[in-house]
Amino acid sequence: MTKVTTLLKTVREEKGYELSEISKKIKIPVKYLAAFEDGNIHHYPHEPYCSLSVKEYADFLGLDGQEILKIFRRDYVQKTEVDNVISKSNGITPKVTFTVLVVFIIGLFTIYLGNEYLKYTQPPQLTIDWPSLVTTDVIEITGKTNPDATVRINQDLVIVNSDGTFSKKISLKTDTTKVVVESQSLSGKSTIQEKTFTLSK
């Protein structure tokens, strides 16, 4: 089955014409003549100028312009249908890719903001490693909380390390002493744990 693209190019080369030469004579841009020969439908001009240009190009080359136009329309329709099927089957276009990427980024940003909001509005986590047996009047309280939280033990401010850990030695002034550990977030939310120690003698 002869294609217009092959026929036009073959006849032009046999007659020794350059595209630029033909373009000047029939007033059709070189880019359209090249598109006709290459079968690049994405560079074809819009109708009806496209069909008129193909017929005029064929007539200039000494071909039957009306017959060439029939073949061209057949090839053009088939090529367009194939491209549409491929496009629909793939479903992946630059526009689709960009849209998916934007949605993905927005989703990540939304999750990040949600986590930051929860961290700001919820009380901080607080884990204490309480001493199991007290045999001396000095004990060490260690634990872990949110790195940006403020920790107080029996109202005394305690340094919180970058990983959220902290420690403080407490003197037991009586046989029974209550130790209160408070962790407070930047928003003022607090988590409190306490335990009463009895000095074993």
Image: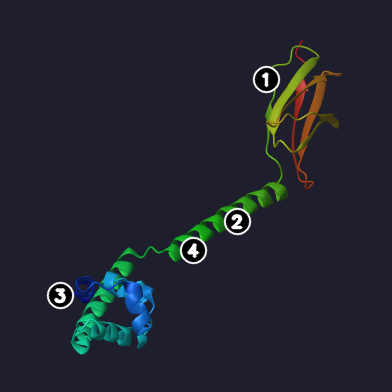
Which circle's residue, 4 or 3, is located before the other in the chain? 3
Left or right? Give the position of 149 relative to 80. right
Q: Residue at label 1?
A: 132
Residue type beneath disc 2:
Thr
Residue type beneath disc 3:
Thr
Which circle's residue, 1 or 2, is located before the other in the chain? 2
- Decide: few, some or many residues near mark 1? Use Cα within 10 Å; few <14, some 14-19, many ≥20: few
Q: Residue at label 3?
A: 2
Residue drawn at 51 percent across, 56 percent down: 104
**Secondary element at tag 3:** loop
Q: Residue at label 4?
A: 99
- 130 relative to 110, above or below: above
Q: Nearer the viewer, mark 2 or mark 4?
A: 4
Q: Residue at label 2?
A: 110
Residue type beneath disc 1:
Ser
Q: Are marks 1 and 2 in contact (CB under 8 Å)?
A: no
